[in-house]
Image (cartoon, rainbow, N blue to C red):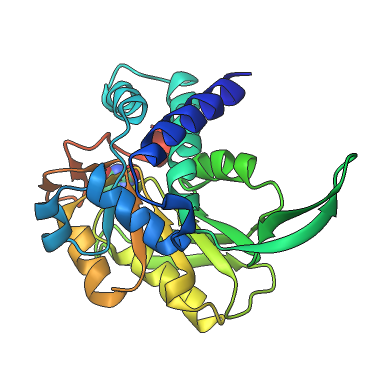
Amino acid sequence: MFQFIMLACLFLTSCAENRNTQDFTTLTSTMAYDVKRAENNSSQSTQKEYPNLYIVKHPLIQHKLTIMRDKNTKLPAFNQLLDEISLLMSYEITRSLQLKTVNIETPVAPAKGFEFAQDIIIVPILRAGLGMAHGLNHLIPTAKVGHIGLYRDSATKKPVEYFFKLPPVTKESMVIIVDPMLATGNSSAYAIDLLVKAGVAPKNILFMALVSAPEGVRAFHARHPEVKIFTAALDEKLNDHAYIVPGLGDAGDRLFGTE
Ligand code: URA
């Protein structure tokens, strides 16, 4: 029920926005979210410094993120909020999905409709990414789901791979990677290396994070400039333990109650 209400709100907001956007529906979907970004999302200065970063600043998302950041927010609220934010962000990130025309029959007449032109694959980076995959999967139930298991070596801060399983992919597949914390950028860039090795085209990869650090976004861009990052917040910095400041602590621990 909650998800239905959120989607209805988003739809109405989007209709209102589109009225102000010239010929919005005739733009290709890639252009569509560039227009959107220029109007509403990342500021001009952020775009210059972080060319592949899209900050999703919807008030519902910012409000929920603030509650998540609060150290007094525990399970199950933390999980629930991450799920809700992911669903809201999914609405934005899926603007880039390509459609193709299909012919259908309504009960009244033949009609033209749309379906996704590419197969869509959601890839959470284990384990915290699991908390963001559900919202996205809820909106795209036909998506397949792959998993990448990485942990961060506490001494080197480099990612160590322990699991990698993908559904069949082609160069056309659209892959959305989810991981709440884009900190050093090492894990995310490593995950993209794995996907590219498996045959996914970098231009068909999107990355969805909740909170990002400037250092990580820069490192990510240096290695994968073609991959767009969607995040709800760009924080101040990393601390000496490679945690995001102010961040929200260890997302995996807070999500699974292991702190
Ligand atoms: N991973 C987390 O869970 N939190 C951080 O701040 C950085 C990496």
Q: Nearer the viewer, residue 236 or 6?
A: 6
Q: How many marks overall?
A: 0
At 28% from the left and 76% from the top, the residue drawn is 223
Residue 41 shows in the view: no
Q: Nearer the viewer, residue 12 or 181?
A: 12
Residue 227 is situated, as x and y percent measured from the top left of the image, at 36, 68
Left or right of 235 in this view: 109:
right
Left or right of 35 in this view: 118:
right
Location of residue 117 with respect to 106 vertically, above or below: below
Left or right of 222 in this view: 227:
right
Q: Nearer the viewer, residue 33 or 126?
A: 33
Residue 42 is situated, as x and y percent measured from the top left of the image, at 21, 48
Q: Quadrant of ligand 1?
A: top left
Residue 180 is situated, as x and y percent measured from the top left of the image, at 38, 45
Q: Residue furthest right?
A: 107
Q: Nearer the viewer, residue 4 or 161?
A: 4
* Quarter of the figure with the N terminus: top right
* Quarter of the figure with the C terminus: top left
Residue 53 is situated, as x and y percent measured from the top left of the image, at 26, 57
At 48% from the left and 48% from the top, the residue drawn is 129
At 40% from the left and 56% from the top, the residue drawn is 32
At 30% from the left and 16% from the top, the residue drawn is 72
Residue 21 shows in the view: yes
Location of residue 221 with respect to 23 vertically, above or below: below
Location of residue 146 with respect to 39 vertically, above or below: below
